[in-house]
Amino acid sequence: MAGGWAKDGAEQEQIESTLDDAVQRARRQLPRGESLAECEECGEPIPEARRKAMPGVRLCVACQSELDKKQSAFSGYNRRGSKDSQLR
Ligand SMILES: [Zn+2]
């Protein structure tokens, strides 16, 4: 079956692009779920306005921005792109 190999490759590619797409969408919209009343990291209360604006928020502003810095450093390592600028 000559077609088998090529089809495999195509499927793999599609899976990867679908995953990538999902990750990007998740990052933009943020995970849904319970918002925490207090920061998971430092225990500071998270303002209600922030929890409403960001469903599923788990970190206070300070910790989130720390995390963002780390994450953008990581993703910038692999691919530098418009993705990070779209987040803000
Ligand atoms: Zn915090």
Image (spheres, rainbow, N blue to C red):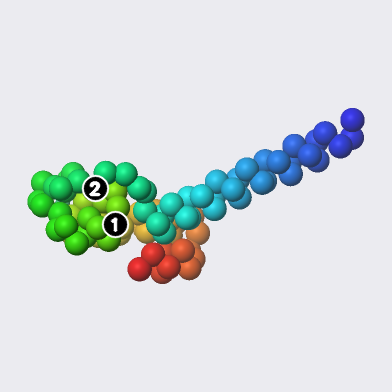
User: Going by the image, does 23 lie left or right of 68?
Assistant: right
Residue furthest out toward the right: 1
In the picture of the structure, the residue carrying the numbered disc 1 is 54
Residue furthest out toward the top: 1
Q: Which residue is at a point 15% across and 54% down the rendered structure image?
A: 46
Where, by quadrant of the figure, is residue 75 drawn? bottom left
Quadrant of the drawing holding the N terminus? top right
Residue 17 appears in the figure:
yes
**How many discs mark residues in the rendered view?**
2
Measured as percent of width and height from the top left, residue 66 is found at: 24, 57
| Residue in front for this viewpoint, 24 or 71 | 24
Where, by quadrant of the figure, is residue 52 drawn? bottom left
Whether pointer 1 and pointer 2 mark residues with C-beta atoms closer than 8 Å, the reply is: yes
| Residue in front for this viewpoint, 63 or 49 | 49
Does dot 1 land on a helix, a strand or a loop? Answer: loop
Mark 2 Cβ and ligand 1 under 8 Å apart: no
Measured as percent of width and height from the top left, residue 39 is found at: 16, 48
Q: Amino acid at mark 2?
A: Ser
Residue 66 appears in the figure:
no
Q: Which residue is at a point 86% across and 37% down the rendered structure image?
A: 3
Q: For residue 35, which numbered disc appears in the image? A: 2
**Dot 1 crowding, Cα within 10 Å, few <14, some 14–19, many 20+:** some
**Dot 2 crowding, Cα within 10 Å, few <14, some 14–19, many 20+:** some
Q: Which residue is at a point 35% across and 68% down the rendered structure image?
A: 88
